[in-house]
Each structure stands twice: as C-alpha cells, then as structure tokens.
Image: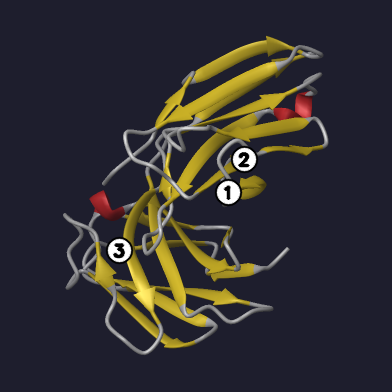
Amino acid sequence: GQQLNQSPQSMFIQEGEDVSMNCTSSSIFNTWLWYKQDPGEGPVLLIALYKAGELTSNGRLTAQFGITRKDSFLNISASIPSDVGIYFCAGHQAGTALIFGKGTTLSVSS
Amino acid sequence: GAVVSQHPSWVICKSGTSVKIECRSLDFQATTMFWYRQFPKQSLMLMATSNEGSKATYEQGVEKDKFLINHASLTLSTLTVTSAHPEDSSFYICSAAMTGRWFFGPGTRLTVL
C-alpha cells in the first residue's frame, strides 16, 4: 500500500531538547494528522490539521500543514521521558482511508 | 475524544483455526471502519475499508476470502482471520472516523502457533 515519507526514522535525544520530524508525499492531502503509538497499543491522535499553512499546537507539540499540501512537520519542545514512543504522520484524501508514514522512533535519555 | 474498543486484546491460536476480532465504536456511530495490520517495527498498513451494510473494500494484496470483514451495525465491525497461519501473526488495529478525525482501537495481538 501507499506510504508517506517520514523522517527521521529514529532519534536519540537528551531530556529537555527539542525534536522535529516531518512527512512528505507526492500526493496532495486534505488532512494531515500526527499520532503517537506506545508499545502494544493503538495510535493516539496528537494533532489534526485541516488547512494548508495551518499551524496548530497541543501543549509542547506544534504541527504545521505545508503550503503545498504535500508535507507536514511536528515539533516537540523541551522533551521529557514520557515522550518516548513512535510518532506517525498520516494523510487523508477525500474518499480514502488514512495513509501512514513509516514512523519516527523517539528515545529520550534523562 | 471518541472511543474505539477491540476484543480480544490478544489471542493465541493453532495454525488452521479461525479467529474473530471485534471493533466497536463506543460513543458514536461509524458508517465506515478501517482495518490495519502492523508488523513489528513497521507502520500501519491498511487492509480493508469496512462499510456498514455492504461489502468491504480490500487493499491490493489482501485476500478477501482469508480476512472476512462484516460490518453489521453502525457500531460494530468484525475481522475474521480464517485458516490462520504463523505468517498471519501480527498486530491488528481498527479505526473509525468521525467529523474529520480518525480514532483507533487499542489493537489485537494475534499469535498463530
């Protein structure tokens, strides 16, 4: 199936550092979403973006919907140990299911 | 947020048996639900789109006779893995959409011995 290009694949950072990850696609999406998945659990929605150029924050998380509608990024500021997990971007086009990126595995050392 | 449940959360079965996984939207009605499969250290791959009252739409490469999907009501979709084999061992996750947001169940870990 189709997948989005998500990078980086993994990150190892110190507690307190900021983190940035992004997703790109060759297709235009109407919606971009960012999820976090803990081991053995389903993805949990972090931020949803519905308009090109939209910049949305959720606590220490900030995400943007790219102007071209083909990309999105997620920033996490002042990381803490509980930020550890796998972060997935997902895009949606009308009439289709969500398409996921390959994920970014975040490790935070204290 | 909206809640999606799955049952069972994990199941171990013998090769050749069938396993049914339920997905329920607990506090909203979902005309469409989605089934994903996730192998270790990989992303979620869409298997099929389940439409209430009609046949499911399967992604390329997914055997519809092996992965039977029934969406009998607006709050329940079931995935039955028929004649399961060890290569079917995976994490199966369902999703339901509501007002432009997609909510996921907690997943079902299937292990086929």
Q: CA distance from mark 1 to mark 2?
A: 5 Å
Q: Quadrant of the C terminus of chain A?
A: top right
Asked if residue B113 lies left or right of residue B44, the reply is: left
Output the chain of dot 3. B
Please identify the quarter of the rendering in which residue A16 is found. top right
Output the chain of dot 1. A
Name the kind of residue labelled 1 in the image.
Answer: Pro
Q: Residue at x 45, y 33 (%)?
A: A68
Q: As displayed, is residue B19 above or below residue A43?
A: below
Q: CA distance from mark 3 to mark 2?
A: 32 Å
Residue, disc 2:
A36
In x, y percent, where is residue B8?
Answer: 52, 69
Q: CA distance from mark 3 to mark 1?
A: 28 Å
Residue, disc 1:
A43
Q: As displayed, is residue A31 above or below residue A63?
A: below
Name the kind of residue labelled 2 in the image.
Answer: Lys
Q: Residue at x 52, y 37 (%)?
A: A88
Mark positioned earlier in the residue sequence (1 or 2): 2
The tag on residue B14 is 3
Query: In front here: A70 or B96?
Result: A70
Q: Nearer the viewer, mark 3 or mark 1?
A: 1
In x, y percent, where is residue B97?
Answer: 54, 67
